[in-house]
Image: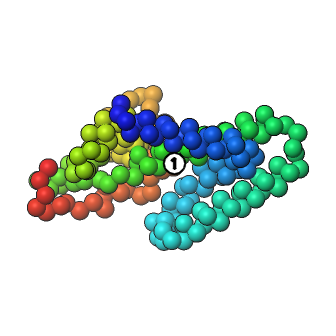
């Protein structure tokens, strides 16, 4: 465990808190954002700007929907805060998992079939935190699930969870798009 795990846990806690504060708007934005993540990742592969505009429009629309419904149902404050927290939790976890599965993949120039995740050429202050992070290790397992499953390196109880998370957070086979880096040592 490293300081990066603590920062990522703080991200989840902060987004959950924001969802609770926004009540029903937080519920709709959080849950909707978590559900729209996969389609937005697919769109971003073709056009990142379009994905950004679509995410902004979807967030605005979901927030307005939550605000409109909140005006209709003002009575249950604790329930609305709880729903907002649930939406914020869903979005916070989705953000953290998308982050830990999106670090660059590095290919060994001496052995092109060998991949490194996280990459070994990160700046010194970040390298040890990323390498020691349990969440980044989880991200590696999610990202490389098909490769790990083929090698038999997935524990029996984790197979379905990793497969589902891989389908949600990974578009295509990003390890095939990584060219070897000539002239860089490992």
Count numbered badges in the picture: 1
- Image height of 118 relative to 134, above or below: below
Residue 181 visible at all: yes
Q: Left or right: where does residue 18 sit relative to residue 101?
A: right
- Image height of 43 relative to 91, above or below: below
Residue nearer the viewer, 95 or 156 = 95
- Image height of 73 relative to 107, above or below: above
| Residue 110: image location, x then y, percent | 11, 53
What residue does disc 1 label?
Answer: 95
Quarter the N terminus occupies? top left
Residue at 75% over, 46% down? 24
Residue nearer the viewer, 172 or 30 = 30
The colour scheme applied to this rendered structure is rainbow
| Residue 28: image location, x then y, percent | 71, 50
Q: Residues within 10 Å of mark 1 (few under 14, many from 20)?
A: some
| Residue 111: image location, x then y, percent | 14, 52
Picture quadrant of residue 74: top right
Picture quadrant of residue 112: bottom left
Residue at 47% over, 44% down? 97
Helix or strand or loop: what does disc 1 sit on? Answer: helix
- Image height of 104 relative to 92, above or below: below
Residue nearer the viewer, 6 or 53 = 6
Residue at 22% over, 51% down? 121
| Residue 79: image location, x then y, percent | 78, 35
Picture quadrant of residue 54: bottom right
Residue at 17% over, 52% down? 108
Q: Left or right: where does residue 4 sit relative to residue 181?
A: right
Q: Left or right: where does residue 110 sit relative to residue 13?
A: left
């Amino acid at each position: 465990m490293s300081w990066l795990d603590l920062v990522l846990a703080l991200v989840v806690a902060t987004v959950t808190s924001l969802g609770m504060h926004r009540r029903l708007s937080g519920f709709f934005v959080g849950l909707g954002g978590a559900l729209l993540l996969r389609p937005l990742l697919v769109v971003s592969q073709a056009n990142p700007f379009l994905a950004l505009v679509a995410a902004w429009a979807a967030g605005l629309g979901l927030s307005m929907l939550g605000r409109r419904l909140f005006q209709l149902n003002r009575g249950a404050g604790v329930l609305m805060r709880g729903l907002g927290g649930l939406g914020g939790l869903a979005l916070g976890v989705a953000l953290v998992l998308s982050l830990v599965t999106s670090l660059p993949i590095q290919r060994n120039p001496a052995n092109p079939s060998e991949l490194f995740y996280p990459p070994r050429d990160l700046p010194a202050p970040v390298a040890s935190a990323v390498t020691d992070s349990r969440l980044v290790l989880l991200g590696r397992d999610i990202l490389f699930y098909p490769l790990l499953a083929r090698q038999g390196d997935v524990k029996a109880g984790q197979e379905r969870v990793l497969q589902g998370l891989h389908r949600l957070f990974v578009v295509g086979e990003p390890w095939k798009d990584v060219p070897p880096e000539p002239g860089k040592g490992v």
